Image (cartoon, rainbow, N blue to C red):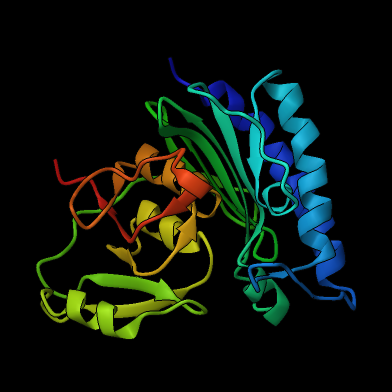
Amino acid sequence: MTFDFLLPGLEALARQAGAVILDIYHSDFAVETKSDDSPVTEADRRAEALILPGLAALLPGVPAIAEEEVAAGRIPDIGDGRFWLIDPVDGTKEFIKRNGEFTVNIALIADGIPVAGVVLAPAQGKMWSGALGHGASMVDADGSRRTISCRRPPASGAVVLTSRSHRNPDSLDRWMAALDRPVLDFAGSSLKLCKVAEGVADYYPRFGPTSEWDVAAGHAVLLAAGGELVTFDDAPLAYSKPRFLNSDFLARAKTG
């Protein structure tokens, strides 16, 4: 079964959330600190409150794991079935810096795999979406849509992406030492996964903790574009883990 029938609804829902987020982005918003010392704003809460009922209407009865709901201790039982993963503002630090590199992330997990997902960059007007078995696309700021796919990494000069706000330079340098003259570039939030899916970058190695909702939507786009997200033991990144926490991982074009 493919889940591409969900994409129009997910794209519309992401854009509605993006409009709410931009209203706050262009205001004098307050920043609070959650119990894990991560920042949160009214944009996170209002966008999530819009997305959750929209998803319930798209697939009634499918539980949703959403970042701010989890932070408030509201975690539904997902069992072994399908469930949504939502990060209403991925890259809150980028949102606070007002650099435009934050995203709305919505993904559906089925059989432990992100089977459909949408990533919207509201401040840039760009959106990436994909469904496993259907393919992936990017919508530019002018509204034009094009199909995207991962590229084969070059033998020399591969583009490696890293985070603007969450970096582990020692681990990154050790990993890059195996490449021939790599080019390091920077991007915030799920944009790194989308750039690999889009074929404008080759690798995104992540050293340090992330949550499943941080990566699920970008992972869905990446899979649909012919890529993969693996641990450094070459195992596919799994979902429904304890506390929904990820180990270190690598995004790349599929090698097998």
- In terms of depth relative to the viewer, which is nearer, 216 or 122? 216
Residue at 57% over, 43% down:
118
Residue at 73% over, 39% down:
13
Q: Is residue 147 visible?
A: no
Residue, far top: 1
Residue, far right: 28
The x, y position of residue 20, in whole percent, is 84, 55
| Residue 89 placement, left or right of 193 | right
Judge whether 162 appears above or below 102 on screen. below
| Residue 27 placement, left or right of 3 | right
Which quadrant holds residue 136? top left
Which quadrant holds residue 161? bottom left
Judge whether 21 appears above or below 183 on screen. above
Disc tally is 0
Quarter of the picture containing the N terminus is top left
Residue at 15% over, 65% down:
154
Quarter of the picture containing the C terminus is top left
Residue at 65% over, 78% down:
99
- In terms of depth relative to the viewer, which is nearer, 93 or 149? 93
- In terms of depth relative to the viewer, which is nearer, 47 or 132? 47
The x, y position of residue 178, in whole percent, is 10, 74
Which quadrant holds residue 147? top left
| Residue 220 placement, left or right of 174 | right
Q: Is residue 220 visible?
A: yes
| Residue 168 placement, left or right of 110 | left
The x, y position of residue 108, in whole percent, is 54, 32
